[in-house]
């Protein structure tokens, strides 16, 4: 099933030129305004260059990827502090997107903030891929690249991203023997890398992963051809998510889904039949109160 993604995208881009590429087209931005001292002047430029090369020039899977199939991602890094040994603390925002079939549009897959990244980065440091040893800087990047791959593959086949989620879990396992921040179950108020990947791979949360697949393949990717059927399917999916969230012990995965999709869902439902639109609003009001402003127009 993992090849389904690439078969679908091949049809989408059938008449474009075929150019082999790596899996990611990732843009890094670094804000170093909070750092004090001339010894950190190198950081912003070299960190951007080094991380983009580490991500974009590496083969993260064994699959052949076309240029237009690359996962679009952005990582925004705010450097909060640094010390004389070039240990840094940072906050990050990670985002990824994938194409919508039969359109020129893209859909947001993941929008996630991480406020607990600590790493050592002296000038001239080499970033090396190593799946057997944990290093705070590259381990953080490896974790999120595999997370994005998992979300991407999950959107093309049911549970298709499991292999990459397991790789992210391996990074977490290696980190447990280290003292780096942000990797334990209790860090960052329980919303952290440990808990996130644990929930993703927990059978009790497969329902949100399957809903994520159906949303992309049976709603977004079919919307142009049959918008009414896609809206009806969306209502089914929202009903399933509502029931699952009521039974869940942790809302993390549900919140991530709606953080990425709330505005898109509202747009899809905007021209729906009044009864369907209002029923969807009732579900969304119960299930995603954090984005209620996005859904207000669905009452009309």
Image (cartoon, grey):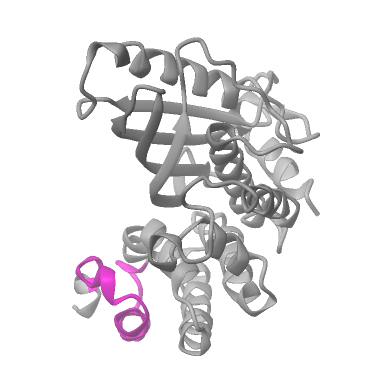
Q: Tell me: 41 left or right of 54.
A: left
Residue 88 percent coordinates (x, y) = 38, 31
Reply above or below: 119 against 121: below
| Residue that extends furthest to the front in the rendered view of this protein | 84
Reply above or below: 223 against 23: below
Q: How many marks?
A: 0
Query: Which residue is at the front of the view, 291 or 264?
Result: 291
Q: Residue at x 66, y 23 (%)?
A: 128
Residue 218 percent coordinates (x, y) = 59, 64
Reply above or below: 43 against 91: above
Query: Which residue is at the front of the view, 289 or 202?
Result: 202
Q: Residue at x 29, y 33 (%)?
A: 81
Question: Which image quadrant for residue 132?
Answer: top right
Reply above or below: 261 against 239: above
Query: Which residue is at the front of the view, 72 or 35?
Result: 35
Q: Main secondary structure of the magenta part?
A: helix
Q: Indicate the quadrant containing the N terminus: top left, top right, bottom left or bottom right.
A: bottom right
Q: Tell me: 87 left or right of 78.
A: right
Q: Does residue 22 show up magenta in the picture?
A: no
Q: Residue at x 38, y 82 (%)?
A: 276
Residue 87 percent coordinates (x, y) = 41, 29
Query: What's the magenta region?
Result: 269-295
Q: Does residue 288 show up magenta in the picture?
A: yes
Q: Residue at x 75, y 42 (%)?
A: 7
Q: Indicate the quadrant containing the C terminus: top left, top right, bottom left or bottom right.
A: bottom left
Query: Which residue is at the front of the view, 29 or 299?
Result: 29
Residue 192 percent coordinates (x, y) = 47, 59
Question: Which image quadrant for residue 294?
Answer: bottom left
């Amino acid at each position: 099933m993992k090849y389904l993604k690439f078969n679908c995208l091949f049809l989408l881009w059938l008449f474009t030129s075929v150019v082999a590429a790596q899996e990611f087209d990732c843009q890094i931005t670094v804000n170093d305004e909070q750092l004090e001292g001339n010894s950190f002047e190198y950081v912003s430029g070299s960190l951007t260059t080094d991380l983009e090369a580490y991500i974009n020039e590496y083969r993260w899977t064994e699959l052949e990827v076309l240029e237009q199939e690359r996962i679009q991602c952005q990582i925004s890094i705010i450097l909060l502090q640094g010390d004389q040994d070039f240990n840094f603390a940072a906050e990050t925002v990670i985002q990824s997107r994938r194409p919508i079939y039969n359109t020129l549009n893209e859909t947001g897959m993941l929008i996630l903030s991480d406020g607990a990244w600590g790493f050592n980065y002296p000038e001239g440091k080499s970033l090396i891929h190593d799946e057997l040893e944990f290093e705070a800087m590259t381990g953080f990047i490896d974790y999120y690249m595999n997370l994005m791959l998992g979300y991407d593959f999950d959107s093309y086949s049911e549970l298709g991203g499991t292999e990459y989620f397991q790789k992210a879990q391996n990074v977490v396992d290696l980190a447990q023997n280290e003292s780096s921040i942000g990797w334990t179950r209790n860090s960052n108020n329980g919303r952290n890398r440990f808990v996130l990947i644990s929930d993703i791979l927990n059978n009790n949360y497969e329902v949100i992963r399957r809903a994520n697949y159906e949303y992309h393949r049976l709603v977004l990717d079919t919307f142009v051809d049959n918008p009414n059927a896609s809206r009806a399917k969306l209502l089914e999916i929202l009903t399933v998510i509502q029931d699952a969230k009521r039974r869940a012990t942790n809302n993390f995965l549900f919140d991530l889904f709606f953080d990425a999709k709330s505005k898109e869902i509202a747009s899809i439902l905007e021209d729906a039949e009044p009864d369907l639109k209002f029923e969807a609003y009732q579900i969304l009001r119960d299930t995603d109160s954090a984005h209620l402003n996005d859904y207000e127009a669905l009452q009309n």
